[in-house]
Image (cartoon, helix red, strand yellow):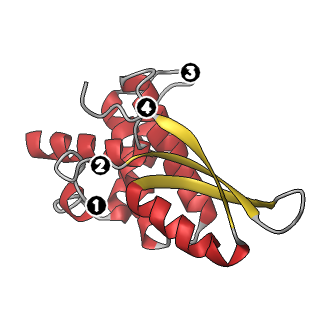
Amino acid sequence: MRGILPVFEIRAICAPDDESRVTTALNQAFSLKSVRAYPTRDRTRLRLYATADHRPEPEQWPTPEEAYAHAPSILSEIGWTTHILASAEYFTELERDYYLRKAAVLDRIALQDENDSDATEAADAAALYLLDTDQPGVICDPRAYVRQQYAAWAASQ
């Protein structure tokens, strides 16, 4: 099945001066989620632990610009998702379009300021919810999945 990307841990041991070079080389080969650095017991080298997954093929995942090229404004999408949520009865399962559009607008907000950890966390959580709802057990970049699904949804509208 396309879109399934295994997540794995990488451990590298390097000289402290080589940390940036090693991290850059790993990031060129894989999509790194996080890199943690700890000194070795003798404190002469660093142990780098990286959570990574394979880089998706470029044609598989649309860029944000491609996915959101014809999307309504962020403000309009926030209004739409708020209206749907406010008009729903308590404990009502909402349509997939709601979760897709919510994840997409949160992704777009997070893309505006990638240093905003709250926006990124919200976008990641919404994307993961959509991915888990659509395809439980599939492992891929949840936000790339949102972009792919949003582009397909927008093309069908």
Q: Earlier in the sequence, mark 4 or mark 2?
A: 4
Q: Earlier in the sequence, mark 1 or mark 2?
A: 1
Q: CA distance from mark 1 to mark 2?
A: 7 Å
Question: Which residue is rendered at x = 49% and y = 33% of the image?
Answer: 129
Question: Which residue is rendered at x = 28% and y = 60% of the image?
Answer: 64
Q: Earlier in the sequence, mark 4 or mark 3?
A: 3
Q: Which residue is mark 3?
A: 91
> Residue 21: x percent and y percent?
54, 73
The furthest residue to the left: 156
Q: Nearer the viewer, mark 4 or mark 2?
A: 4
Question: Which residue is rendered at x = 43% and y = 31% of the image?
Answer: 139
Q: Secondary structure at mark 1?
A: helix
Q: Is residue 22 left or right of residue 127?
A: right
Q: Secondary structure at mark 3?
A: loop
Q: CA distance from mark 4 to mark 2?
A: 15 Å
Q: Which residue is mark 2?
A: 147
Q: Amino acid at mark 1?
A: Pro
Q: Are marks 1 and 2 in contact (CB under 8 Å)?
A: yes
Q: Nearer the viewer, mark 3 or mark 1?
A: 1
Q: CA distance from mark 4 to mark 3?
A: 28 Å
Q: CA distance from mark 3 to mark 2?
A: 27 Å
Q: Amino acid at mark 3?
A: Phe
Picture quadrant where residue 40 is located:
bottom right
For residue 64, the mark is 1
Viewer-side residue, 26 vs 101? 26
For residue 139, the mark is 4
